[in-house]
Image: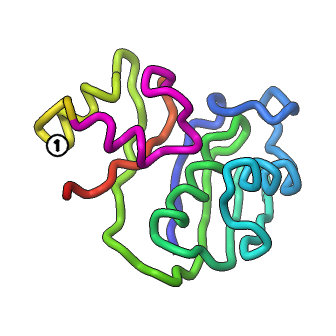
Amino acid sequence: MGVFDFLKSVGEKLGIGGDDAPAPEALQKELAEHGLGGDRVKIEVVGDTVKVSGAALSSEEREKIVLAVGNVEGVAKVEEALTVEDPQPEATFYTVQKGDTLWKIAAENYGNGSKYNAIFEANKPMLKHPDKIYPGQVLRIPPQD
C-alpha cells in the first residue's frame, strides 16, 4: 500500500470547485474517462483523502490510477491498496514546479531533455499535449530503458 501527497488546491476541476473533496462517483467517472480501473477499482473519500482499493492490470495502470484521482482539485492525499496482476519496475513521481517543461524534467531525470516524450507517453491519457503541464501537477517518470 502506498500513500501519495498532492496539492489540494490544484488539479482537474470536477465541477465542485473550492476545497471540497470530489465525490467517489466523480472520481470513478474520471477513471472511466481515462480508461483506467473499471469495476476492478473501489474509491472511498474521507475528508480530502481518497482511498483506492481493488486490482490493477499492471504497475503502470496502478500508478496512473493514483495520478488520475490525485491530480484533482480538493484531493490532498491518495491511499492506495491495489493489487497488481502484472508487476513491472515502478515509476517515480515528480511534482511539477513553476518554470518546468517536460524537456527540463527529462534532462534532470534521464540526463537528456530529448527523452521528454517518454514522460509524455507515460502520462497519457491524463496529458493531452506535452506543453500542457502546470505547477503542482504530479507526473509519472518511468524507469529508463
- The percent position of residue 36, horizontal first and vertical second, equals 66, 60
**Residue 51 location, quadrant:** bottom right
- The percent position of residue 124, horizontal first and vertical second, equals 52, 44
16 vs 90, nearest the viewer: 90
Taking the spot 59% from the left edge, 76% from the top edge, the residue there is 82
Q: How is the image coloured?
A: rainbow
77 vs 120, nearest the viewer: 120
Taking the spot 56% from the left edge, 82% from the top edge, the residue there is 83
Quadrant location of the C terminus? bottom left
**Residue 126 location, quadrant:** top right
Taking the spot 76% from the left edge, 55% from the top edge, the residue there is 32
Check disc 1 and report its element: helix, strand or loop. helix
Q: Residues within 10 Å of mark 1 (few under 14, many from 20)?
A: some
136 vs 144, nearest the viewer: 144
91 vs 119, nearest the viewer: 119
Classify 23 as above or below 131: below
Q: Is residue 51 left or right of residue 103?
A: right
- The percent position of residue 137, horizontal first and vertical second, equals 51, 34
Classify 144 as above or below 114: below
The reply to whether the magenta stretch includes residue 123 is yes
**Circle 1 is placed at which residue position?**
110
The reply to whether the magenta stretch includes residue 117 is yes
**Residue 74 location, quadrant:** top right
How many numbered discs sit on the rendered protein?
A: 1
Range covered by the magenta-colored residues? 115-133
Classify 50 as above or below 5: below
Q: Is residue 88 left or right of residue 26?
A: left
User: What kind of residue is marked 1?
Assistant: Tyr
Residue farthest left in this picture: 111
Taking the spot 52% from the left edge, 84% from the top edge, the residue there is 85
Q: Is residue 143 left or right of residue 76?
A: left
